[in-house]
Structure formats: structure tokens, C-alpha cells
Image (cartoon, rainbow, N blue to C red):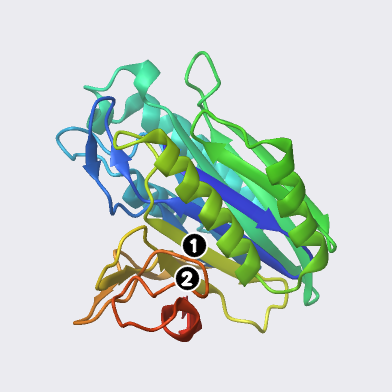
Amino acid sequence: MTLVMVAMNQHFAVQVSDRRLTTKTAVVAEEYAKSVLVQTPTGRMMIAFTGIATTPNRSFSAHEWIQQALADVSYGCHSDYEMVMRFKDAANSFFHSSPKLARIALDQRRLEVCFSGYRYVDNKPHGIFATVSNLRTPDGRFDANFQSGDAPFQFLTMIGARHRPKAAILSVARDILRRLDKAEPMIDFLGDYIQSFAEAGGALSTVGKSLDWLTVYADPARTPVSGYRSGDVKAETYMSDLLVLGAQGPLASARNLSLTATHPLAVPNVHRNAPCPCGSGKRYRDCHRSRPQGVSV
């Protein structure tokens, strides 16, 4: 299962999720998109999922279905709450009746989708966190949970992988949320945690070391940022998918975005004074650590 971590305070919301795709017995792919940035008429939300990602015959792709379902339910939708509730109904209908899932046992059709970000009312931010999930329902029906609060709205959670972080880890993360108005330290902290979890799980862990991260800001004038982090030196980098929804339906979308170069674009995080993993001979702090991280979207 994908591991997704979300942290939010009065300044920013951060989502970090791994990209590994697995079956019960094998790793299928290290780079599989599982996150999307959604722009709505009233706000911005980051979305990620854990659970069933695809079927053996590839007739179903969760990340494509999620975006199509959101586009379908957006017509005439007046609020983020209404959109989440409509999405829950769409999930129940599709997962119980679609021929694309006919060969998958009902108890294997499990999915959890999380929504986090801000809605803007009179230019003031209201934090949002919601889940639509059937991971814990005996009959496989989807339930929805929706939370919203005025700033300061502080939130920290994790979905996926059957694991809960130690109290000390949560304490450090909450301290970062309380003290900082910059997202980068939280991205680094959550990324380090997920990658250490992946390393502890070994080669067949359901959690991988390639990560997507997204940041949206409480200030509606600030542009959201999408980024990628790898456990290896790579000449590729990836962006989360983008979906723009209007009051009368979808306006634009972009999927499977990546960039390839002739030099390393992604390297593992190391100590700032250690040699940069890219092989340049420079210290990490003077090389890839000092380069811009993420792309405005």
C-alpha cells in the first residue's frame, strides 16, 4: 500500500506520497503516479490514494478513474463538501458494478482517497481534510469523512501502509508545524520518514523511496508547487497530475508529466556537507541541495 502523509498549518499544506506499485508478491513499478493537484472554483486540494491501483489486465487505473470521477461529479457542484460526497457515491457505484473490476474479488476492491488543502471564502483560507474509503468497511461500501476549520487549522495524518509512527516522530512533526511558515522543512521531514520506512521494509516493501510531494498555500496568491524526490540518482523528475474544475465541469487536465535531462535531476538527500550523490565532487549543500526544488503549477 502507498504511504501518504499530510501536514497542514495556517501557512501551508504539504502532501508526500510514495510512487511504488506492488502486488502481494512483487514490485511491479517504482514510478506510478498516485497524486493530483485539483483547482476548484473555491479552492485548491491535493489528492492521493492508497489501495488498489490497477488490475492485472490494466483495464482499470485508479489514478485515471479518480480524476475522471472528479470531473464527472463537478458539474453544478457548489462546494468542496458536495464534491467529496458526490465522489463517495460515484465510488460506491463504480466499485460494485463496473465490468472493469469484475474479475477482482469484492474484498480486494479496496481504496482510500484523501483530499487536503484550502477553500477560500472572502479571500480567507479554511483548511480542508477529507477521506473517501472502503478499507475498513466489511461490505466494501465507501464512507466519507470531511473536516474543515478556520485558520489556524493544524493537522497531521498518515494513510496507507499498516503502520503508525512513534509518538516522538509525531511530536517533532507537530513542532515543525507550530514554528514554521515555510513548507520545505516539513517536506524534508516527511520525505525522510517515508524513505526510512521504505528502507526498513526491504526490497519487497509496499512503500518505495521515489516520492511525489505537493504544497498548497493558505495565501491564495501563492502558486502551488509540485516536486519529486528519489532514493537514487536519476536524470528524470516527475510532477503530480493537474486537474482544473470549473463550476460547470472540468476545464483542463495534465497527466503523467515528467522531465528527462542529460544530467542528474534527482538525487537522494544526504548531509549538507557530504559529497553530492550526483558525482560532481561538490558538497551537497553547494550542489543539488542549493538548486530549486519543485515546479510551480
Do the numbered discs 1 and 2 sit on residues whose CB atoms are within 8 Å?
Answer: yes
- Number of the label disc, if any, that sits on residue 226: 2
Name the element at disc 1: strand
Q: Nearer the viewer, residue 57 or 173?
A: 173
Under mark 2, the amino acid is Ser
- Of the two numbered discs 1 and 2 on the same chain, state the one appearing first in sequence: 1
Count of labels shown? 2
Say which residue appears at 78% left-offset and 77% top-offset. 123
Provide residue 59's location: percent of width, then percent of height.
Answer: 19, 39
Under mark 1, the amino acid is Trp
- Neighbours of disc 2 within 10 Å: few (<14), some (14-19), many (20+): many
Q: Nearer the viewer, residue 91 or 172?
A: 172
Provide residue 114's location: percent of width, then percent of height.
Answer: 56, 46
Q: Is residue 297 above or below residue 59?
A: below
Q: Nearer the viewer, residue 23 or 150?
A: 23
Q: Is residue 1 above or below residue 178?
A: above
Q: Is residue 84 above or below residue 97?
A: below
Q: Which quadrant holds residue 116?
A: bottom right
C-alpha separation, residue under disc 1 versus residue under disc 2 = 6 Å
Provide residue 229's location: percent of width, then percent of height.
Answer: 41, 64
Say which residue appears at 72% left-offset and 77% top-offset. 219
Say which residue appears at 44% left-offset and 37% top-offset. 200
- Number of the label disc, if any, that sits on residue 213: 1
Tell me if 216 is positioned left or right of 27 in this view.
Answer: right
Provide residue 58's location: percent of width, then percent of height.
Answer: 18, 40
Tell me if 258 is positioned left or right of 85 in this view.
Answer: left
Q: Is residue 279 above or below residue 161?
A: below
Q: Nearer the viewer, residue 110 or 139?
A: 110
Name the element at disc 2: strand
